[in-house]
Amino acid sequence: MKNGKSDNKPINKVLIDKDKPQFFDFDKTLLVDDKIVEKKNAVELWRDGAERAFKAETSYLFAHTIRISCSKTDKFEVGERVLLKVMDEEKESQSFLELPCEIDNVEHFSKITHLVLKIEQSLEEKLGEYQKWFDSLSKTSRSEEVDHKAVNFILQYYKRTLVGHLLYPVLFTGQQIRHAFVSKPGAASLSFEDEKGGHLLISADMFYGCINLPKKSDRIPLYLWSENNKVYFFSGQDYPKLSPKKIIPWLISKPDWRVLLLCNRKAAPIHDNQLAEIETYVESETIQDAEKFKNSFAQIDSVTSVLDISCLFEHVWQPLEEKIEISAKQAVTVKGVAEYQVPSFRIKRSEPRYQYAMKLKIGNMNGGGEIEVITRDVSFLGMSATAVGESLPFTEQAMVSVEFLEWNANLKQGFFKREEPFADVEYKVVNLYKSQDGWDIRLKRDKRDTDPKINALLNEKLDEVKQSDKGEIRNNLDLYKSLYSGLWIANNIAGLAFFIGKDQEGVRIIQAIVQTEENAKVRAPFKRADDWRFLQQLALPVAVELNKNTPGMEPEPLNIGIYVYLESSGGDPQWRVKTDLDFNSIEAKASFVKQALEYSQHYFFHAVVLPVKGGKDDILNGESSAMVSFAALRLKQIHCVCNSLIAVAELTNVTKLVEFVYRS
């Protein structure tokens, strides 16, 4: 019980709504200030020179902003300056507080309009009067309608989920590519299958000709195909006078073609308050260890997203009306230019690990061969190693036997009855990642299933490593690097990111939408609350399609085109929506797109969707209290919201590109 009221109110009703997705501002560290007061008080809004006031009432008060509600109106705009008069509750015709404000946000619902007013900070006397009123109310407020700590917690989870499930490669550049981030599924757009069933990984250096910092945001199509185990490519910059309508028919005649869209824009840096937030999450020694990593971001000035938009053209039939000559370049991997990094928000390791390089032999316990690798670091229960070659004799989650070649060679004869006690140690492959330099392999063993003599010898060897000049690796250094780079990635989302989840009845819904300054143009056509129902129509069919992924296999991103137009005839405007999943023929797709082109409000999007793999982020496990503290019941409710996620997705506006292809 709290203030005489039950604390059992389910937060799900606030944060999961099948009719109205929640909007989360990723440009901000926190959604609301530390203090929030629910207060209904009559107010008047006065414009300069106006003879009459506009009447409204407050709903929530914050330290520097006030949220008010009124009857639905379109009279107010963001950026407009007004005088807010707070009316006396006893003498309703008189005001006891007058505050110059700027309208910071306007939200329209079916019958009401909400305004967020930012109080003018330069008027110290007026601000002081408001602060006294705010403080007096905050001591007596019993509001439980908004649990702002819970909302902030879920904001952090959404951010980290999106970063941990990167839908496509993201490149941060200065004079060169400084950082390249990608998830394992997202790397699918950068590889081709060769004749042996392996993968030809496209190096990030292939994009250098298209990522120079533009005067303004620009988007460059990159056309590529694989032939005879070689990758060829050319960009829209190479042939600026050739429209996609001519290039696409030429390209799809190639054996294994793909179209990438490189979206370049100025980078938005992280802010000091964001940095301070994550630095409270790790030890000071970790921050010092990561100083070099942090400095590597200092020269970043642009960001490039690499989208695979091939799906937009897979069901397009266009005759090649004239012969065109195109000279393509061959993609040559240049090692060391830019290595892709995979953010990981794993919980802290339970035992120390050490930088240590030695040879191992790893074999598949079910047969299939073995391979020699070099370790990067070792610990009592696990290790990471690097291998070269196009393929491995084992897969992720496989059980393997490990032979410690160097440690075995140095053992005294007769140390154990077995001649090579380190020749058959059982490990599990917990993670595999193919980079341009080889394979990144992470192994873990279960000490309960290991001979106690092996455990004793491992401890002895690790003591020797500890005494050497190889230093201990901070257990949460990887976590800090992921948090830090995650801020950069989240601050630079340009498309419309959203989350697919389930409501209390298990209905698939669009659970939340990410709003940023960068994606404001994508959101602009959908100003009314009802407008977002066009997106809600996608939740069920997309979730069904994702379920077709083969169990046990790494899920691949779902890439589809979304085609939308507003049909305004007949009174009530309706959004008509189709995706590439709905078309069973080239003619059906062409018919719908051409019909959409007849309406003034038509929008075409590329969408990439990836299933959420839960349970790996420590924010939902034992480290929750490091961020915020909740009562056990409220924490359970928050976890219910977070665990209801099915997938993350992002929309990119490709209206002009589709128009080029379909307009006659």
Image: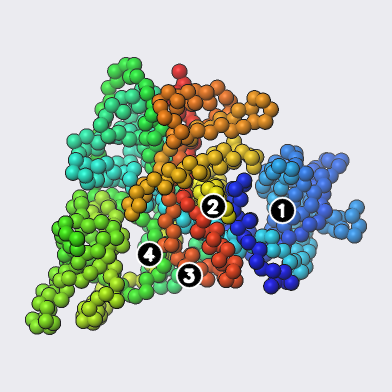
Name the N-terminal-most of marks 4 and 2: 4
Where is residue 337 drawn, in percent x and y?
Answer: 28, 49
Q: In front: mark 1 or mark 3?
A: 3
Q: Residue at x 26, y 45 (%)?
A: 201
Q: In front: mark 4 or mark 2?
A: 2
Depth order, front residue of 296/657: 657
Q: For numbered disc 4, what is the local secondary structure? A: helix
Name the N-terminal-most of marks 1 and 3: 1
* Mark number, residue 506: 2
Q: Which residue is mark 4?
A: 478
- Between the residue at mark 1 and the residue at mark 3, the CA separation in whole angstroms equals 33 Å
Q: Which residue is mark 3?
A: 623
| Residue count near mark 1 (Cα–Cα under 10 Å), binned few <14, some 14–19, many ≥20 | many
Quarter of the figure with the N terminus:
bottom right
Q: Residue furthest front?
A: 505
Q: Is residue 15 visible?
A: yes
- Between the residue at mark 4 and the residue at mark 2, the CA separation in whole angstroms equals 35 Å
**Do the numbered discs 4 and 2 sit on residues whose CB atoms are within 8 Å?**
no
**Do the numbered discs 1 and 2 sit on residues whose CB atoms are within 8 Å?**
no
Residue 607 placement: quadrant: top left
Depth order, front residue of 330/196: 196
- Between the residue at mark 1 and the residue at mark 2, the CA separation in whole angstroms equals 32 Å
Q: Residue furthest top?
A: 321
- Between the residue at mark 4 and the residue at mark 3, the CA separation in whole angstroms equals 15 Å
